[in-house]
Amino acid sequence: MNIAIIGAGSTGLLLAAHLSNKHQITCYVRRPEQQKEISQRSIHLYPENERYSVHAELIDRIDVHDLYIICVKQPNLSDIIKTIYKNVPIDKPLLFLQNGMDHIAKLHDVKNPILIGVLDHGANRVNDYTVEHTGKGSIRIGAKNKEDKKLESLIKSLHSNTFPVFWENDWLRMVKKKLCVNAVINPLTALFNVVNGEIVANDNIRFLASKLCKEACEVLQLDEEEMWVYITEVAQKTKTNISSMRKDVIHHAKTEIDAISGYLVKVSQKEIPYTNFVYYAIKSLQTEREDY
């Protein structure tokens, strides 16, 4: 399959490397420097220490492909959607892999078949062409607006034993669960500058995490007990990982707090004080910088 990957951050580079084993991959990036690096050096994947050759192009030169995987972060998504409107045929499926739920509303007017995905891998971009695979997991994908067997078959063709991809019938519940996890782990690890495991290991952070979990579950109508077990499992499984929000704060980049905690604050019908606090606390730490 001929696949476009839009955005070559940690997620985009990781997908490009693994999917290039079976598919023809083109990475679309904003900066000419990154386009040149990927084209000339290939993608380096660690700790495997392997190289993967893919095509790289600038985003304003986007071409026709069988599938478009959009990996840019929430703050850059609106501009990418405008580019898609202008250049991508409406029969071509679009797969969105973003944290939070703020992007769902932005897709309302998109006529293409829309796929929503949740990625459970850990990845860290070392430089413009190198990505470290810090935690192995899976990708779960469901159809938002056009459910048919062709889309399911297309997504299942991405699957491999080394990089599992699964079809999800209830995409909304899948996204809600991921949002709940992100609303707990991301802001706390960023605020306290700790690895994910401290959500469980540090009693004081654990207390705050339980409060954030309770509030998120109330807003999203999820079972609190079930989600708390799930969140602690994720924190333990990824205990040495650095969350994406912590990375953004460290690197003075704009975070996805608006799409995560900000989304909960926006849609909540009642006061959620713990979520409200971490939302404004992270906003005070971040500085804006385009990065895709």
Image: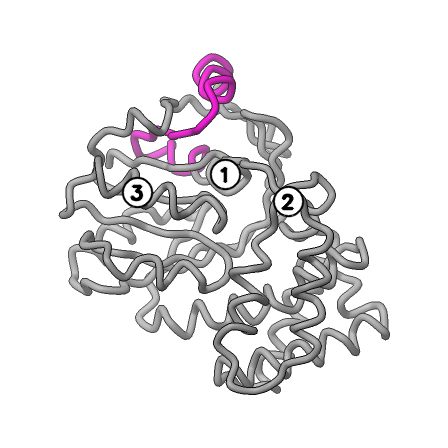
Q: Which residue was labeled with disc 2?
A: 134
Image quadrant holding the N terminus, namely top left
The residue depicted at 61 percent of the width and 50 percent of the height is: 255
The residue depicted at 76 percent of the width and 67 percent of the height is: 199
Dot 1 alpha-carbon crowd within 10 angstroms: few under 14, some 14 to 19, many 20 or more: many
- Percent of width and height locating residue 5: 37, 37
The residue depicted at 59 percent of the width and 64 percent of the height is: 182
Whether the magenta-drawn stretch holds residue 21 is answered as yes
Badge number at residue 84: none
- CA–CA distance between discs 1 and 3? 25 Å
Whether the magenta-drawn stretch holds residue 48 is answered as no
Sequence-wise first label, 1 or 3 = 1
Badge number at residue 14: 1
Q: Which residue was labeled with disc 3?
A: 82
Give the residues in magenta.
16-41
Decide if residue 46 is on the left or right side of residue 139: right
Say what amino acid the circle numbered 2 marks.
Answer: Thr
- Percent of width and height locating residue 249: 70, 47
Decide: is 95 above or below 209.
above
- CA–CA distance between discs 1 and 2? 11 Å
Q: Number of labelled discs?
A: 3
Sequence-wise first label, 1 or 2 = 1
- Percent of width and height locating residue 203: 85, 74
Decide: is 214 above or below 178.
below
